[in-house]
Amino acid sequence: MRFQDVAETLGSKKAQAAFRRGLNRVGDTARTHTIRAVAKQVGLTQTKVRRFGGIRTIRANNSNLTYTIRSTGRHISLREFSARQFSYGVKAKPWGNQRRFQGTFIFAGNHRSGQFVGGGHVFHRTTSASYPIKMMFGPAIPREIIKDESAKAFEDKSLDLPDRIAHEVRAITDGVVD
């Protein structure tokens, strides 16, 4: 079904409403599935993906028939990935896989001291001296959202758009136009 055919049949205002409603419905579904896929991909909860990924949507409206999903943010600190300190270093689960980070630390002094160095973040030394130390990071949501399973989830859901627009046209015309 082409926009011109629908516009000729319904009139431009009703056609625009059908396309807007279809775009927003499919876009919202695609956003949900994309966030779900990113959460699984990076090893975080969906709430943390929304928080650290800065995911914002711009829905379609009468003046602009586009649906945009925008993500902003930096690499996420390893502390968000269930980081725990042991005698050899830190264990964390970035990208959903548990990994050892040799020579890293969360606590000051002994690994059992319980006194955080920097709010529970994971650090490693850059030299043999006590300082300087550098914070360790995991994935960045804006980079992860455009690859692998999350990109596939978005593309799969976007294929539902023609059927959804046809459904909206039927709803507006009470089933007269198919």
Image (cartoon, rainbow, N blue to C red):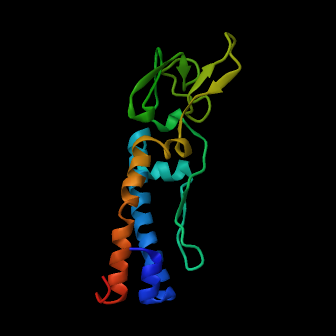
Q: Residue 77 location in percent, x, y?
A: 56, 36
Asked whether residue 82 is in view, the answer is no
Asked whether residue 51 is in view, the answer is yes
Q: Quick one: which residue is furthest to the top in this view?
A: 128
Q: Residue 127 location in percent, x, y?
A: 68, 13
Q: Is residue 55 above or below residue 17?
A: above
- For the point 69% across and 12% down, the residue is 129
Image side of residue 178 versus residue 27, left or right: left
All told, the count of numbered labels is: 0
Q: Is residue 109 above or below residue 142?
A: above
Q: Nearer the viewer, residue 105 or 31?
A: 31
Q: Nearer the viewer, residue 35 or 14?
A: 14
Q: Residue 6 location in percent, x, y?
A: 42, 81
- For the point 51% across and 27% down, the residue is 114
- Which image quarter is the C terminus in? bottom left
Query: Residue 9, located in which quarter of the rendered image?
Result: bottom left
Q: Is residue 105 above or below residue 70?
A: above
Q: Residue 98 location in percent, x, y?
A: 39, 27
Q: Nearer the viewer, residue 173 or 130?
A: 173
- For the point 48% across and 48% down, the residue is 49
- Which image quarter is the N terminus in? bottom left
- For the point 55% across and 46% down, the residue is 142
Image side of residue 119 versus residue 162, left or right: right
Q: Is residue 158 above or below residue 17?
A: above
Q: Nearer the viewer, residue 137 or 63?
A: 63
Query: Residue 137, located in which quarter of the rendered image?
Result: top right
